Amino acid sequence: MNRIKPLLGHRLFWPVAVLAVMLVANTIYRPGFLSIEVNNGHLYGTPIDILRLSAPLILVALGMTLVISTGGIDLSVGSICAISGAVACLYISKAPDQNSFGMVLTALAMALGVALVLGAWNGVLVSVIGIQPIIATLILMVAGRGLAQLITEGQIITINSGPYRAIGLGHFLTLPLAIFIALGAALLVAAFTRRTALGMIIESVGGNREASRLAGIRSGRVVFLVYVVSAACAAIAGFMMTANVSSADGNAAGLWVELDAILAVVIGGTSLAGGRFYLSGTILGALIIQTLTTTVYAMNISPQTALLFKAVVVIAVCLVQAPAFRARFSRRRRGTPPPPAPSPQRQKEEVPA
Amino acid sequence: MRNMRMPMARRRAIAVVAAVLLAGSVAACGNSDTGSDGGDDGKIVLGFSQVGAESGWRTANTNSIKEAAAEAGIELKFDDAQQKQENQIKAIRNYIQQKVDVIAFSPVVESGWDTVLKEAKDAGIPVILTDRAVDSADKSLYKTFLGSDFVKEGRLSGEWLIENKKDAAGDVNIVELQGTTGSAPANDRKKGFAEAIAADPKLKVIASQTGDFTRAGGKQVMEQFLKAHPKIDVLFAHNDDMGLGALEAITAAGKVPGQDITIITIDAVKDGMQALADGKFNFIAECSPLLGPQLMDLAKKVHAGEEVPPRIETEETTFTQEQAKEALPNRKY
C-alpha cells in the first residue's frame, strides 16, 4: 500500500488510467484494436491512427496550455487553423508546379506569417489594451472563420501537392511525419519553458501579474508572447488538418478544436485560473480525446448516442481528476478523516477564466 | 452620488446629446419603415436566408439564386446564416419586419421552426422552403417546398447497387458515411437507401457512422471502418466530400477505390465528378443546386396568389463513370 500511494497521488495517474481503460475496453470489444502491421513499408494500425490524428490537437493544446497558465484563454485557435490552412492551400493551388518544394516552403512561411500577425493581434488586445482574454480572442474566433471563408471564397480548395501532403500523411522511420512534428513542438516548448526560467516566469505571471511586474518581470511581454506562440502552434496544426485531406475547407477545418484543446489542458491537470501548467498532462489529455473519438467509430456507436457517450466519459474523467471529488469519495468509503484540504490553487479552478 | 457633483453645464450637455440621439433613433425607425416597403415600385421583394457557404454545392446554390433573381427582376434580400438556426430565425424576423413580399429559406435543421413560421403567416407573408424541409406538423405554415428528394437520391443509389451486385456471390458488406446527425439529407438518404437495398437480402449495411459531410470526417471514419471490418465491398457516402475523404483512407489501407470497394456518393460536385470520371467512384446520384429559376417562378406565383403544389422537385439525374466523363466539361460547379 505504501508503494502504491505515491503512484496514486501522481497527477498523471488518473489520465493514464483513463487512457488505459479505454484501450482495454476497445481491445475486449475487438481483439485486433491494438495490433500494428506493416503496410507499404509503414506501420499501420489503430494506435498509429490515434497518434497521427491527435497530432494537430496536441499542437493546439500546447499553445493553449501556455495561454491558460498565464490565466488567459485563446478561443481563436480553430479559426487560425482554418486561416493558415486556407492561405497555404490557396498559394499552392495558384502555383504553376504544385510539387515544388521551395514553393511549398514559401506557402508555409506566408501562412505562418499571417498566423503570427493574428497571434500578435490577440496579444496586443490582451496585454496592451487589457481586454479580457475570453472576449479578445472571441473576436478572432468569430471574425476569423469569416476571414477563412473569404480567402477560400466559400469553396473547398483542392490541391495536389506531394510536399504539402507529406505534412499530414508523410512517413519518417515508418511512422507518420505528423507524430514527429507534434513531438518536436512539444520538446521545443518543454525545453524553452522547463530548461530555462521562462516556464517559471509564465507561471509567475499567471499567479499574479502585478506582483510579477513589481518583481521585475515584464508581464506584458510574457502575456503577448504566449498568444503569439499559441497562434503559431495553431497554424502548424492547420497545415496538418488541411494536408491530411489535401484540401482547405474554410468552414470545417479546425471547427471546435479550441474546445477540445481547452478540455485536453484541463484533463492534463493545468488550472484554468493560471499559475501552473503541465505539458505532459496536456499531451495525455489530447490522446484521451482522440482515443474517445476513435472508440466511437471502432465500436460503431450510433451517431445519435455518440455525443452522450463522449459527454459521460468526459464528465467521469473530470470528476476523477478533481481532488475535491476524490477526497469526498474516499472519505465516505473509508470513513477516515478527510485528507488535507485542496491547495488554494486548486480551489481557484472553480473560477471561470 | 457622483452625479450630484457634476457641473451643471455638463449635465445639460448630456441631456442635449441624449435628446438628439433619441430623436435620431425615432427618425431612423420612421425611415426604415417607409424605406423597406418593397411593393412600392412594383418589384417583388424576396427575402432569402441561406444555410451558409459550407461547400462548393452551397456556393453554386447561392449564385444560382442571385443570378435568377436579377434575371427575373426580383429584388433579393440575401442573408447568410452561417449554419446557425438562431441567425436564420433572426433573419426571417427581420424580413417580416421589413414587410418583404415573399420569404424563402433553406432550413439549417429540420425542427424548431413553428413559432417563426407562424409569425410570418400572421403577417401575411408567404414562405417557400428550398433545398431542405422542416418537420412542422402544420403544413399551412409554408406554401411549398422546392428541393431535391433526398429519399429518392438514396433510393436511386440503392437501386443502382442492386443492379450492380446482382451477380455477386455471398454477402455484400456495405459501410455508410452519414451526413450531419439529424439533418434532413442524412436522415432521408439513409432511409431511401435502406428501403431500396431491402429488396436484396445479400446487401448488408455492416457499419454506419457520421462524417459530418466533411472530407476530414469521412476520412477518419473510413480509416476505422477499414480496420474494424476486413471485408468491405461497398461504401455509400451521403455526399461527395465524405467520399473524397474516404478515398484517401482506402488508398492508405492498400486497396484500390472503385475496384476493391465500390463507391457510391450523392451530390455530383466538380471534385466528385472528377473522381467518378477517373474511375475512383462508381456512381453518383445528383443533387442539383441550380434551383434559382424555379424559385423565382414560384415566388411570382405565390405573390400573385396562385395555388402551387406543396412539393416541387428540382430536376436532377444520376451519373455513371462514362456519363461523368461526358458531362464533366460542361459542369457549372
Image: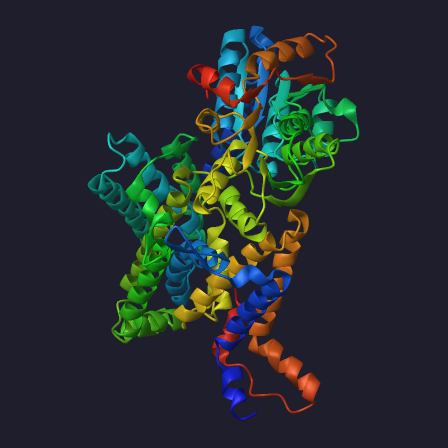
Query: Is residue A350 something one can see in this rendering?
Result: no
Q: Which of the two residues, B165 or A300, is positioned nearer the viewer here? A: B165
In the image: residue B304, left or right of residue A76: right
Q: Which residue appears at 66% of the width and 17% of the height?
A: B313
At 29% from the left and 62% from the top, the residue drawn is A220
| Above or below: residue B23 compared with residue A114 | above
**Left or right of residue A323, residue A178 in this image:** left
Coordinates of residue A154 in the picture (x, y in percent)? 43, 31
Residue B325's x, y, as percent? Answer: 45, 19
Considering every residue shown, the one lying at the far left of the view is A102
Tell me where residue A303 appears, x and y as whole percent.
64, 48
- Left or right of residue B49, residue A121 in this image: left
- Residue under the point 70% across and 36% down: B111
Residue at the farthest bottom position: A2
Number of callouts in the render? 0
Left or right: where B266 falls relative to A194: right
The answer to whether residue A112 of the structure is visible from this angle is yes
Q: Say above or below: B6 vs B71.
A: below
Q: How is the image coloured?
A: rainbow
Question: Relative to B60, is A26 above or below?
Answer: below
State which quadrant residue B317 falls in: top right
- Is the residue B307 above or below the residue B165 in the image? above
x and y, in percent, of residue B201 in the image: 74, 36
